[in-house]
């Protein structure tokens, strides 16, 4: 019978990972510790599972550390995939979300949602995005997710109250 595994309560694994990425120093510390283990002779292939990254990435950290020291472990701007929209299109999108209504473009809603923006961008910029990425773009533009309350202007308040009363009587 093996030893019991300690369970962390109060935090979900995603929340803990978010804490690591919330401060650049934590990320540098993790990379530095991986490099320390390399210097002790631990194979990069064994470290990839521990650090949830490829062995090649761990070797890249080590090479950058050798060449640039701690500066080489800092994440630099401009890495990764380039944006699909140019600066002018981002500005247009920001103005669109902040000042215009989707109804002006033929959508049957008063608020910009991820799926509506995906469709609008596809029509006007000929660029396709997935749901996860569109929410990253919305955040980068300075907007936050707002949960909408259902409001139906065509609804009859009297009929709604009658319906609620009939539910109470039936339950």
Image: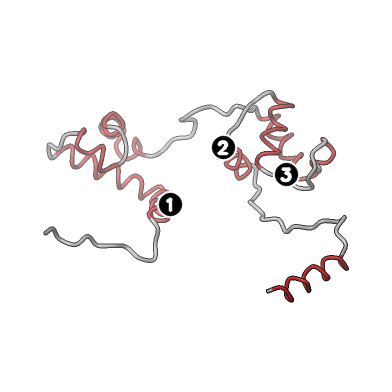
Q: What separation in Å lies between label 3 and label 2 (alpha carbons)?
A: 15 Å
Which residue position is annotated with label 2?
A: 133
Above or below for 154 versus 39 = below
The x and y percentages for residue 64 are 30, 31
Which of discs 1 and 2 lies nearer the camera? The answer is 2
> Which of the labelled discs sits on residue 9, or is there none?
none
Which numbered disc, 1 or 2, marks the residue that appears first in the sequence? Answer: 1
Which residue position is annotated with label 3?
A: 112
Task: Give the residue at x 75% y 45%.
Answer: 98
> Element under label 2?
helix
Above or below for 27 versus 82 = below
Quarter of the N terminus within the rendering: bottom left
**Quarter of the view holding residue 157:** bottom right
Task: Give the residue at x 64% y 28%.
Answer: 85
CB within 8 Å, label 1 to label 3: no
> Element under label 1?
helix
**Quarter of the view holding residue 95:** top right
Q: What separation in Å lies between label 1 and label 3 (alpha carbons)?
A: 27 Å
Residue at the far top: name it: 126
Which numbered disc, 1 or 3, marks the residue that appears first in the sequence? Answer: 1
Which residue position is annotated with label 1?
A: 18
The x and y percentages for residue 135 are 60, 42
Residue at the far bottom: name it: 169
Task: Give the residue at x 85% y 59%.
Answer: 155
Near mark 1 (Cα within 10 A), the count class, few <14, some 14-19 or many ≥20, is few
**Quarter of the view holding residue 61:** top left
Which numbered disc, 3 or 2, marks the residue that appears first in the sequence? Answer: 3
């Amino acid at each position: 019978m093996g030893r019991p595994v300690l369970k962390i309560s109060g935090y979900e694994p995603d929340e803990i990972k978010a804490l690591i990425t919330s401060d650049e120093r934590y990320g540098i510390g993790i990379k530095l510790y991986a490099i320390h283990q390399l210097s002790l002779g631990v194979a990069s292939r064994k470290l990839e599972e521990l650090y949830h990254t490829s062995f090649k990435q761990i070797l890249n950290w080590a090479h950058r550390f050798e060449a640039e020291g701690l500066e080489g472990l800092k994440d630099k701007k401009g890495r990764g995939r380039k944006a699909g929209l140019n600066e002018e299109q981002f500005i247009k999108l920001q103005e669109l979300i902040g000042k215009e209504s989707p109804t002006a473009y033929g959508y049957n809603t008063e608020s910009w949602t991820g799926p509506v923006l995906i469709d609008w961008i596809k029509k006007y910029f000929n660029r396709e995005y997935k749901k996860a990425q569109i929410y990253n773009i919305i955040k980068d533009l300075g907007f936050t997710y707002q949960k909408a309350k259902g409001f139906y202007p065509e609804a009859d308040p009297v009929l709604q109250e009658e319906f609620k009363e009939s539910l109470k009587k039936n339950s």
